[in-house]
Image: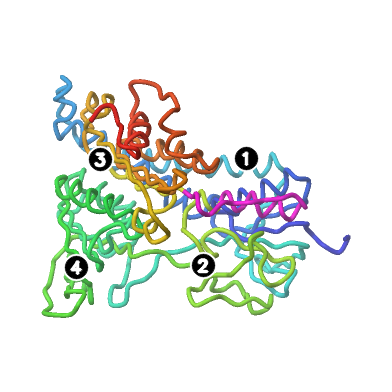
Amino acid sequence: MADYDYDVLVIGAGPGGYVAAIRAAQLGLKTACAEGRETLGGTCLNVGCIPSKAMLHASEYFEAAAGGSMAKMGIKVKPELDLPTMHGQRIDAVKGLTGGIEFLFKKNKVDWLKGYAQFTSKDSVEVAGKAYRAKNIIIATGSSVTPLPGVAVDNDKQIIVDSTGALELAKVPGHMVVIGGGVIGLELGSVWRRLGAKVTCVEFLDQILPGMDGDVRKEANKIFKKQGIEFKLKTKVTKAEVKGKKAVLTLEPAAGGDAETLEADVVLVSIGRRPNTDGLGLDKAGLAVNQRGQIETDHDFATQVPGIWAIGDVIPGPMLAHKAEDEGIACAENIAGLTGIVNHDVIPSVVYTWPEIAGVGLTEEQAKEKGEVKVGKFPMLANSRAKTNHEPDGFVKVIADAKTDRVLGVWCIASVAGTMIAQAAQAMEFGATSEDIAYTCHAHPTHSEAIKEAAMAVTGKPIHV
């Protein structure tokens, strides 16, 4: 219809939003994407996944040089930390990738509407004072850091920071306290530990990495403790005060009890993320959020209002960039009249610590709730490549249905677990059995052979243990 400015208008240019916009444009739909940041790519590219990986990778090199693993291989060096240059390569990585998205927008003729969009009706938004009408509007505004009552974040002061502030620290803290034993806290805590900080992680639950497989959580705790991270589990933070150039935290047992104080140079608040739905004017579009602040959608990512769709962190499900991207493609295809599907049972998750931790599908605990299972485990210590590379920590675990042998979940801790998990996800997407994986030839010597051996262990027959 001529009175529409666009066939598709995407609100937000994070992984879900920019991918949805590009896919819609590829399918011949006139497309725009509204984004108020100065650069495209959302949290992930600007202050999340990408810059954190730049710091993780650099700090791994520093520790390998300083901590002796290079010396074991006959490479003797005395590294000197140049933190401004380390930050510089992080900034360069972000600049290159966000610029790449801008190039892809131009290549695919996606209009970038510079500003934050607000609904004025069910098919109209306002961006930077200008009105736009679209036949389809996709909400892809992502998520932001969940605040912790009694702990006020001020990234500029570099004392009490969130994940964004923790990437920007101008010097290595003497003592960093991480509030939250989830993915972000452990990744950023491990960066600064490698560069010389003492790190204490305070977690409300009785174990780190909530939502992951029980064996993985226990093993990860052991590995991080061995690396020097101190854990205070079953503990809550009730208050944080800045005194001079330090923070003083008040801690209490999660179940209640006597309070104690803990002093830190830097406090990282990383207790999770919440959907960005405030300020969108959803009421003017006839939309409401659920109790968690999320927008509910059907299987096709359509909301209750025809013509309005939602993807990524603003809808239920894991807050992961790759989930949002897949949903962006599927949503655009559904708008174009194709069949866009995301299998939410097979979304891998990765913790980019050293070693990496990855999983896909059900945990052993979840699988047992659904029925009888068989489990195979294989230690990385028995994997020839991991052993040769001085990477003995971790294991691979395959969980299969006891009757059908269909793989229900795969969990691994290994230096390249994030890359290894793709094989497991693909196998599960095709409905593979543990036998299918066990009888698939794997290249030798590779870390991925541990997946084959763990699959063989489901029926009790691994070769190398």
Secondary structure under badge 2? loop
Q: Are marks 4 and 3 in contact (CB under 8 Å)?
A: no
Mark 2 or 4, closer to the camera: 2
- Residue 263's disc number: none
Q: Is residue 83 shown above or below 179?
A: above
Query: Where the C terminus falls, by quadrant?
Result: top left
Q: Which mark is residue 276?
A: 2
Mark nearer the viewer, 4 or 3: 3
Is residue 463 positioned above or below 348 on the image?
A: above
* Mark 4, residue position: 247
Q: Is residue 66 left or right of residue 29?
A: left
N-term-proximal mark, 4 vs 3: 4
CA distance for labels 2 and 1: 26 Å
Label 1 to label 3, Cα distance in Å?
40 Å
Q: Is 385 placed above or below 146 here?
A: above
Mark 4 vs mark 1: which is more N-terminal? Answer: 1
Residue 308: x and y in percent read 69, 66
Q: CA distance from mark 2 to mark 4?
A: 29 Å
**Does the stretch in magenta take in 344?**
yes
